Image: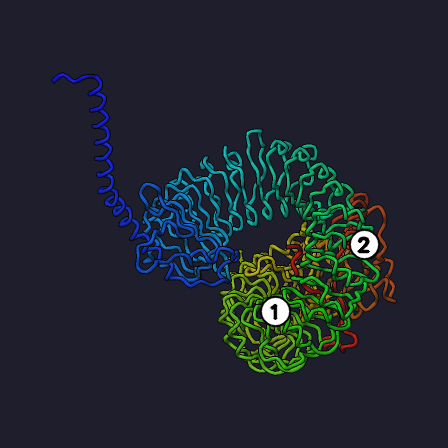
Amino acid sequence: MIISRGMESRCSKFISVRCLILLLLIATHCFPLVQTVWTVGRVDECSALLQFKQSFSIEESASGERLSCAKIASWTQHGGERSNCCSWDGVECDEDSGHVIGLDLRSSCLHGSIISSSSLFDLVHLQRLDLSDNDFNYSGIPSRLGHDLTSLTYLNLSSSVFSGQIPSEISMLSKLSTLDLSSNVFNGNSLKLTKTTLGSLVQNSTNLKQLHLSMVEIYSTVPDILVNASSLTSLKVDSCGLYGEFLVGIFHLPNLEVLYVSYNSDLTGYFPTFNKSNVFKKLNVANTNFSGQLPTTIGNLHSLNLLDMSNCNFSPLVPSSSLRNLTQLSFLSMSSFNDVSKGKLCVSFSWVGKLTKLYHLSLGNTNIRGEFLSFVANLTQLEYLNLAANEISGQIPSWLVKLTQLTTLSLGDNNLQGPIPRSLFQLKNLEYLLLPDNNLSGLVEFDQFSKLKKLKGLELSNNMFSVEIRNDLSATLPKLQTLSLGCCNLTEFPNFLKNQSRLTQLDLSDNKIHGRIPNWVSNATRETLSGLYLYNNFLTGFDQNQGILPWTNLNFLTLGSNLLQGPLPIPPQSIRFYDVDNNEYTGEISQLFCNLNNLFGLELSNNHLSGMLPQCLGNSDVLEILDLHNNFFHGPPICPNSLIIVDLSYNQFQGKLPRALVNCTQLNVLNFGNNQMSDIFPSWLGALPELRILILRSNGFHGIIGTPTTKHEFPKLRIIDLSNNGFSGMLPSNYLEIWNSMKYVDDSQQIYFQVHSNIQKRYTYPYSMIIHGKGVELKYKKTLYLLKLIDLSSNRFEGEIPAGIMGNLRGLVLLSLANNALTGCIPSSLGDLTVLESLDLSQNQLSGRIPNKLAQLTFLAYFNVSHNHLSGPIPLGKQLDTFQEDSYQGNSGLCGKPLSKKCKDSESSTRPLSSIVEEDEDSGFQIALDWYVVLPGIVSGLIVGVVVENIWITKKHEWFVETFSRRRKPRGTRARRGRRTYLPKGP
């Protein structure tokens, strides 16, 4: 057939139209089929999502951020029709397959548990899963997560109340790029991860970029495999219990931008040499044991915007010329970062003035001295400024008004003087103003704070001013969250508290507030208050007798040193620390105290409580501090196995020491003094690894103190008081030989002995203690850390004082062996106890001479060898010359000053300058020492004595030691007690 060119063109067009019509017909008939396939593919997943939703309740309290709570509420089916779940909030589907590949339910107020049969694991195509900021009711992470959701590249379960062991199957998620399991610590429950599982996870997930495990309990060394995790850009392993040396190779990971290892106190490490290829943006090693010199190459980290080195042990030699090059820094914290906080060196921080992008600056406890840092005026972007716990003097500068962005100003614990400048009230963005523990003076008109409309926290405690509060302030003051007005000369509860409905912390301690606690204090803060501190006032009770205290979320309550009477008020179940000591409470402890499952500290001492102790208190899993002394309890003591402090002194306990105490492996202090116990020496307590103070004085303990089973018993013991018992036999030389903590003088600058709570990790407890030393009864309101004491007086010990062993206990401050039946000579080796302040050997049967070597004890403040059989001249010496006759009386053979009996020429106590003959009573030999050898020692000893004395005198905290009778003082003469402060030092 012959077809013309025009006809050919028309045929082509006809065929093309027919093809197009055919394609449209095919599409019309086939697309529903394809759509049906997609819909069927999503129906199961939509159903799984609905089942997942139905397994939870929606509660606003389940999320901290509540803006997204309505997200899951949109998941519904309309009239039984098939729903397109890909349109639901938080659900992401693949455009091609229609499968659910993303689920974002962060902050969705979900409350319930995820169990292994959860329909969540039917979503096998999931690639991104975010369940953060919900409440999954302490449920564990099911192992099916690793088995069934193997396509996950992003997994975030942070802040969602998970607990228990993280399953090893999580390491099967080999495609992970981001894993966040952080901040799952609630009410003592937390997530736990083994080092093996962590190593397998890092090894299998080769594309892992973000690994966030903050507050996950790992308790191991850092896995070596992390050095090979070259893809990591962000590693957060803060508060994980890591220990050992941090792997320096991690600092050299090529892509690492964020590294948080803070709050691992047993983790050591140092900063390596940094090169210009490092890409760090955030570096946080705060509260670790990192040390060494800061490298000058730290200036190469040009991208660094956050640097936190607070509470470390770095060298005080700061490479300021390098640090000033970190011009991108917006966050800098160096509080307590090295030894400058211990008074060894004053460091200049003038280089900080070059970092003009800073919005957060923390230089607390860095030994800054003198006037206020003038360079701070250059940092106009500052929002947070912390200069607390330094030696800053002078007035608060008025130029602080230039820091218009300031939200937090923390200047507490300095030497600031003068009035609070009125310019501070122009800082309109100020949220926290913290000025406690200074020397600020004048009259503070409280209504001025009404100008700070955003104010949330105000601390003015422990200054020298008086606070004037008008009664009509309620309507004008901002709603505060924390308020500290301790020691502000208040005489009544401020009326404006009636309308402070957001208060979480209220401190009105150390004032002169009389009468009863008004009902409106609890009415306004019933659901918000977590800390109430009213100790050391003149309070007599509550407006209405309280059975159970009304604050439903109260954690800390201190009502000590008041005039409170009647039965003990019962705190709510939320209580963690309950202190009502030094009051007039009577009656028994209610059985309702057994329901306080969160209680870790209970102080009821110095009341008139009586009766049997509730034995159910021993079932507590968290009780750490138990102080019931000076009451009238009887019956067997209680023994919770998590205790840190047990003080049951001055009661009427009988029988043997409870053997269950051997389970208290965290026990630091055990005080059963002044009871009616009858037992042999509790050598089994030597197995307690943390025991530092053991007081069993004035009981019926008896028998011979035998030989320790191992050389490792009582490894940290530093204070032991066994006085006024019936122990017999030889002095326990085998124990004295292994008490290693008493063999050295601490170089630590810690002033007071403190124990750290395992439950409330930021809480420290300064232990108060009564001892007998220096011839009187002493009360240490804060027990000195340097105090090392052995008191074995008033027993039936006999035999000689073990000379060589005693001379090794060079850290001893007080030693009393008085009122025993000891014989032999006074060992000259006691002169080696160079920090000894009190030595009592009176009322024994000691003979021979007083060793001349004791004259070298330059700190000796009390010395008593009366009522022995000593003879010969009393040695001459700086300290020995200060003691009176009663220190030596009852020794008919002694002569010389201060006694009236003079020595014969043959036994004169005067020594020629050419030489000194020292009698070595231990060996029976006489050793001649040239005067030029002895003189430098004496001079150096005096110099050390004067220098150390100077240091102690100039310490900011002094020895809170006072003499008092065992009976409680009348209220008119009561002493203010050293106390703890719980208010937060910043937001």
Q: From the image, which quarter does the C terminus lie in?
A: bottom right
With 920 as the anchor, is 596 left or right in this view?
A: left
Look at the numbered discs 1 and 2 and tell me whether their residues touch, using CB distance below 8 Å: no
Q: Could you say whether the residue bearing mark 2 is in a helix, strand or loop?
A: loop
Nearest to viewer (mark 1 / mark 2): 2
Distance from Cα at disc 1 to Cα at disc 2: 49 Å
With 973 as the anchor, is 2 left or right in this view?
A: left
Report the amino acid beneath label 2.
Pro
Query: Residue at (62%, 39%) from the top-left corner?
Result: 292
Q: Earlier in the sequence, mark 1 or mark 2?
A: 2
Q: Nearer the viewer, residue 197 or 954?
A: 197
For the residue carrying disc 2, how many other residues have a C-alpha within 10 Å: few (<14), some (14-19), or many (20+)?
some
Quadrant of res 357: top right
Q: How many marks are shown on the rendered structure?
A: 2
Query: Residue at (61%, 63%) from the top-left corner?
Result: 693
Q: Nearer the viewer, residue 923 or 242?
A: 242
| Relative vertical location of residue 331 with respect to residue 49 in this rendering, above or below | above
With 631 as the anchor, is 592 left or right in this view?
A: left
Q: Which mark is residue 421?
A: 2
**Percent x, y of residue 978:** 71, 65
**Percent x, y of residue 922:** 68, 56
Which residue has dot 1 on it?
Answer: 671
Quadrant of res 553: bottom right
Q: Could you say whether the residue bearing mark 1 is in a helix, strand or loop?
A: strand
Report the amino acid beneath label 1.
Asn
Quadrant of res 872: bottom right
Q: From the image, which quarter does the N terminus lie in?
A: top left
**Percent x, y of residue 587:** 61, 83
With 525 as the anchor, is 257 left or right in this view?
A: left
